[in-house]
Amino acid sequence: MDLLVTGSSGFVGRAVFRATETLDRKFQIKPVALDAGVDITDQRSLAAALARVKFDAVLHLAAISYVPDAVKNPEKTYLVNFLGTHNLLRCLKALHFKGRLLFVSSADVYGRVSETALPVDEGATPLPNNPYAVSKLAAEFVCRQWFLSESFDIVIARPFNHFGPGQRRDFVLASIAFQLARIRKGEAPPRIQLGDIEATRDFSDVEDIVLGYAALLKHGQGGEIYNLCSGTERRIADVVSDMVAASGLNVLVVTEASLYRRAEQRRMRGDASKIFRQTGWQTTVPWSESINRLLEFTPLTQSKVPL
C-alpha cells in the first residue's frame, strides 16, 4: 500500500519516513510525500500536487501543531488545520479516491478534564480550550461528515503527547534535551528553565505513535476515533529527573512563571484500550530508551519554551 503523507517534512512526518523499512515489513505500507512546499490551503495547488502522486491511502499530518503559535494566530490555525483538511477531502473526491484517510487530530481536543475522569477515553466530551484544539475538533467533524455523507473511509486518531529526535524545541521534552546538550557543551550554565513541572502528561515515543497510525490504517474501523497513548501519567518534575540522570550532569531546575501556559490542564492520562482491542497496538519502546535516544540526537539550536 502506497501511503501519501501530508506534512511529511514535519516532526512526525520525518519519523514516518525513518520507519519505512518497519512499516513495509509489518504492514506492507510504503510512505510517499507530496511535492515540497505544497500549500494545503490552496486547493488548486493541492489538487495539482495530488494528481502527480500514486497512492492508496492518506495519512493527514499537515497542521499548525504548537499551541502558543495557534494562540498568537488563530486565523492561520483555522485556515491550515480546518480549511486545509476540507480542501484535501475535496481534492480526493475530485480524484475519485477510494482508499482510507487517517486524520491525525489531538488529545488536546478533550481540553479541561476533571482529575476524577482520568484516564480519558474516547467517550469523553471534548471541551477544547485553545484555537489549536478547536481547529482539530472542527476538522474531526468535517471528516465525520464526509464519512457519513460522502461515504469516505476515514479514521480519526487522537494522539497524546509524543516525542523523539527532531522535534521542535518548543515542546517540553525536546526543550529539556536541548538545554542539557548546551550544558554538556559548556555553552550554558548548569541549570534548566521550565514552566510548571508539577503538571503531568501521558508521553509516548514517536516511533510507537507511527506504528499506531499504521495499525489504524490497516485495522481501524471507519468512522471511529482512537486514542494513542501510553496510559502512563508522568510528572514533568520526574521526567526532568530521569533525563538529567541519563545525561550524567549535575544541574539546577528553575521554574519561570513566564513559561506557564494559561488554561493549562494540570494532569493528563489517556486510555488506549480501544485501539488495543481492535488492532493490538500498544506502546512498546522502553522509557529509558526513548529519553536516551532523544538526548543522543538533540542538535544545538536556541530555544526557551513553556510546557
Image (cartoon, rainbow, N blue to C red):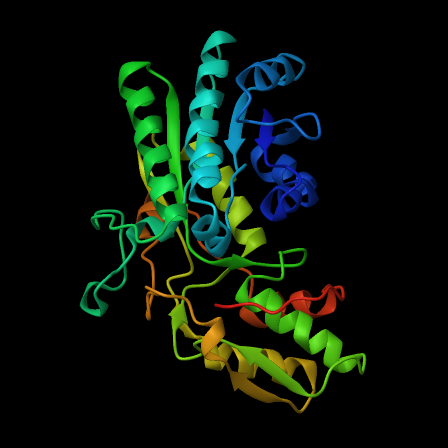
Give left or right: position of 260 versus 252. left
Task: State the residue at coordinates (35%, 52%).
Answer: 130
Q: Is residue 110 above or below residue 176?
A: above
Which image quarter is the N terminus in? top right
Image coords of residue 2 (percent x, y)? 61, 24
Task: State the residue at coordinates (37%, 51%).
Answer: 107
Task: State the residue at coordinates (53%, 52%).
Answer: 208
Instruction: Using the rendered view, name the quadrant where residue 245 is placed.
Output: bottom right
Camera-side residue of 260 and 12: 260
Task: State the residue at coordinates (63%, 13%).
Answer: 48
The answer to whether residue 285 is seen in the rendering is yes
Give left or right: position of 131 versus 55. left
The answer to whether residue 216 is seen in the rendering is no
Image coords of residue 197 (percent x, y)? 45, 78
Q: Count the labels in the image.
A: 0
Image coords of residue 123 (percent x, y)? 21, 47
Give left or right: position of 52 versus 163. right
Q: In this view, does 97 lie above or below 257?
A: above
Camera-side residue of 271 and 12: 12
Q: In this view, does 205 lie above or below 245?
A: above
